[in-house]
Image (spheres, coloured by chain):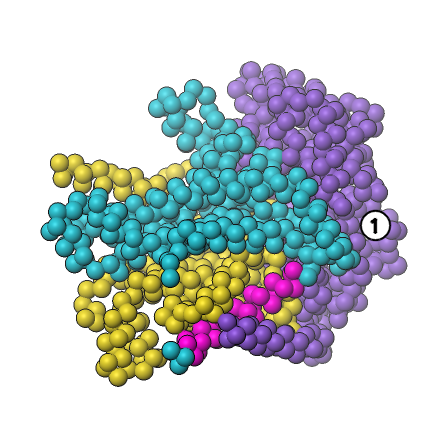
Amino acid sequence: MKKSSLIGWQFILLPSALIMLFSFYPMIQSFILSFESGKGNVSEFVGLGNYTRLLSDPIFRQALFNTILYLIIQVPIMLFLGLIIAHLLNAPKLKFKGFYRTAIFLPCVTSLVSYSILFKSIFAVDGIFNKLLLNMHIINEPIAWLMDPVWARVVIILAITWRWTGYNMIFYLSAMQNIDPSIYEAASIDGASKLRQFFSITIPMVKPIILFTAIISTNGTLQLFDEVVNITNGGPGNSTMTISQYIYNLSFVYTPNFGYAATVSYAIVIIVAILAFLQMKVGGDKK
Amino acid sequence: MRALGTFFKHAFLIAASVISLFPFVWMLIGMTNTSSDIVKGKFSIGSEFTNNISKLFDAAPVGSAFMNSVYISVIGTVLTLLLCSIAGYGFEIYRTKGTDRLFSVLLLSMMMPFAAIMIPLFKLFSGWGLLNSALAVILPTMTTAFMIFFFLQNTKSFPRELLQAGRVDGLNELKLFTRVYMPTMKPTYAAAAIITFMANWNNFLWPLIALRTQEQKTLPLVVSSLASSYNPDYGIIMVAIVITTIPTVLIFFLLQKQFVQGMLGSVK
Amino acid sequence: MKKALSTLLVTTVMASALAACGSNNTNTANDASSNEAAEGKQKVVAWAWDPSFNGKALNIAAELYEQEHPGFELEVVDMAKTDLEQRLNTNLAAGVSEGLPDIILVNDPNIQKYVNSYPGTFAEFTNSNVDFSQFSQYKVDALTVDEKIYGIPFDIGVTGLFYRSDILAEAGYSAEDLENITWDEYIEIGKVVKEKTGKYMSTINPNDEAWTSILLQSGGSWYITPDNKGNFVNNPVMTETLRLYKAISDSGIAKPVTGWSEFVGSFNAGDVATVVSGVWQIASIMDAADQKGQWAVAPTPRLNIEGGVNASNEGGSSWFVLDGSANKELAMDFLGSTIGGSSEFYERFLTEAGGVGSYIPAFSSEAYQQTSEFFGNQAIYADFTEWSTQVPGISLGMYTQEAKDALKNELPNILNGADLEKSLANIQKLFEQQVQ
């Protein structure tokens, strides 16, 4: 047994060391910085001052609220959709699988610049989406999507879901492909329905990947930046702003306060770490 | 009854495909129109395609940026697949309490927003004299907790009996990895390759900071410069964007067959 | 467990060692320009955004400079404005000079922020041979921090009321009716235009504070006071500006837009009758070739309060030289003799790039007196430069962006009819919270 664990360390040593060097070393420096505050290079030690400031910072609270809102609503919808689509595309006899696969994956590679311009124009007050809803008599007046705090968040959620469902679909599909089809055959022979097979065979065998996507999506949504900056720029007011955007503003838009930005960054780390820990406890394997 | 089910399945998938494809089609149409037409929302094909292409190549170093992106992305992806799969495999197959703890720590590295570690990382590479080189971009991104995590989770469904069989056949631990694990996990490698290539290809913030001269620029940097003039020419921006999108789509096309293979015919 | 700890220990030690041996090299790292200087060539590297405007200007200046200084070479590295700011901040915050250029373009509202956040980074032009009295005073004001002048003024953002003369005529208004009006008059005209032609008078974008900036400066005020305090309460200019903002939004004469391309699309497509913007908007307006001859420019509407004038500014940038650059003197001389004092440069800048500078001697040149067919044969540049002499000079302070964001946060409430005084107090509080 000892020999095998030595070999195990040989497998993981180099990659771990690389992560230590390129991620942890800067993270530690950032942590030290989080105890300083000031402007640009003119900063001084403030102890826990930044952390206390964080607790009463109204903009941080707004950003936190928005970010958690996106997380709770968007991630489950996206993972569920990704799972369903992957399952449908996993069927051996479905026609046009290749086309569907490619089409649904394309949003992941469509450039941020181009689809944010497009989303803005689709959801403009005189944009196509309003025209569609008006024509179908679902609404009586055009909705000012990007100028209303609630609807703007809806647009962001739609944008993220549109963009990343295909991404998660890929993960699920490749995991489903690892399941031996003879298991399904045996179950069919035993009389289990397709639905039953999905819940009793597919889901349990794909569970590690579901956990993976849950943690990765949580991480990604909590660090959401691109869509918010390019489609709504945090607005209207600060109603769509995320924590990552706030960190960026603190470093590069406002008079730079890198110390406080580091503090806010660690707020994200702590939140994601707690959530990841919980998710692993719930969905991890028991050994 | 079966036909109805199939009908709904296809209807759903077609709807999903149309919604997914629409912006992409819009990009393609935009390539053929003038900037003011695009801004006005024109949705028909124009005649500016060749014009936009030549304007683009005049305005920006697209050729060299493309090659830089290819070089960095391909090398980065290959290295990532090797390093992260070997680590993911190691963390799962030779799992101990100690390795579990180490992995949890490594996972933390994913959770830090990049903007916060950018400056110390920049100092590091400057100190080594590696700024403005492909290495500056490849090194920090070739090992990620994300990818190690991906391989680790996928390895959980890897049948250990295959390893036992291999040991009985006299293979050493490394050969078990290369001869038994790697061929069996092709779908996982394919998915990882697509995801990693995409991440490397579209990587923006760190290359922006680490690469400084026109010759070293990657494609996303070129697109960003174009999109931010006082009077952006959306026609050439669309061409640039499509050029940027094509390689990832190509890689996806090439690798997606792996999703269909599964474990049929693997070592049994 | 021991293994985990020792791995961590070993790798952390390795990392620190690698990093430490690396940091010894920081001082010996050369940047490209000093290498070139050693070879006997005289090369200067500049960062700018928009190669057809800023980059072009530098190249024109280089051509002029080369005539007197053969062997001079200029390299312009082009990147997005926000990207430039990220790179600059990263370099300066990391204390790394490698990769920095000799010359950099800076947006005026950022000047004080950079000078105060990174002391000693930018070269002073106070005692150089540039005659700053030859430039629009308000541009020089923006460059002056603690009595020191830090760069050379570049393009000017003097504003005007661009309007579609054909649409206004259809509604019954001539050019005289738009001369030197107040904003309330503008709104009244807008209502008639909407009624008679169905066109919006202008656009409105609640996420963009360009409009409020224009109004504030036209009243001699700004979001922050010269000593960097919030200027939201007890500020009649601010109160009047926001009252007008709500008035325009309520009047129905403004088309809501949410982004730059929608904004440009609105006037390119002929959806709006006017655009109040800086002189640099000319290029985008002229993109709609089918609207040739249908545009004209009037003075910016003014605030109907004491100190309100029919002139303001939007945007504008200046050239800075990095104090630590090896080619500092060369860069300063280059900028100083071209952009800092050559009428020929400014004439070429206008005719070849459509750029308007703030160099007063150039204003009387032929180029600046030309008429524009697109704008109904109006001598637009002569008008703009005339207005530029009336723009109130203000201090842009260090915290412009924080103040703008604090305002943006409260704008939806204001537009929904919240009590203005209360809103202003909220904004003030939010701002003060942000600038600890």
Left or right, C176 with respect to C198, comes to right
Q: Which residues are magenta?
A: A4-31
In-front residue for pair C371/A243: A243
Residue A2 found in image quarter:
bottom left
Identify the residue at horizontal 34%, vertical 79% (top origin): B173
Q: Nearer the viewer, residue A187 or C431?
A: A187
- Give the image quarter of residue C120: bottom right
Closest to the observer: A64 or B156?
Answer: B156
Question: Who is closer to the viewer here, A283 or A266?
Answer: A283
Quarter of image, res C163 = top right
Q: Amino acid at mark 1?
A: Thr
Q: Residue furthest left?
A: A189
Residue located beneath label 1 in the image = C144
Relative side of C266 to C308, left or right: left
The number of numbered discs placed on residues in the rendered structure image is 1
Q: Which chain is cyan?
A: A
**Do we see residue B59 in this rendering?**
no
Give the image location of residue A111, x and y in percent. Answer: 45, 51
> Is residue C77 toward the left or the right of residue C216 in the image?
left
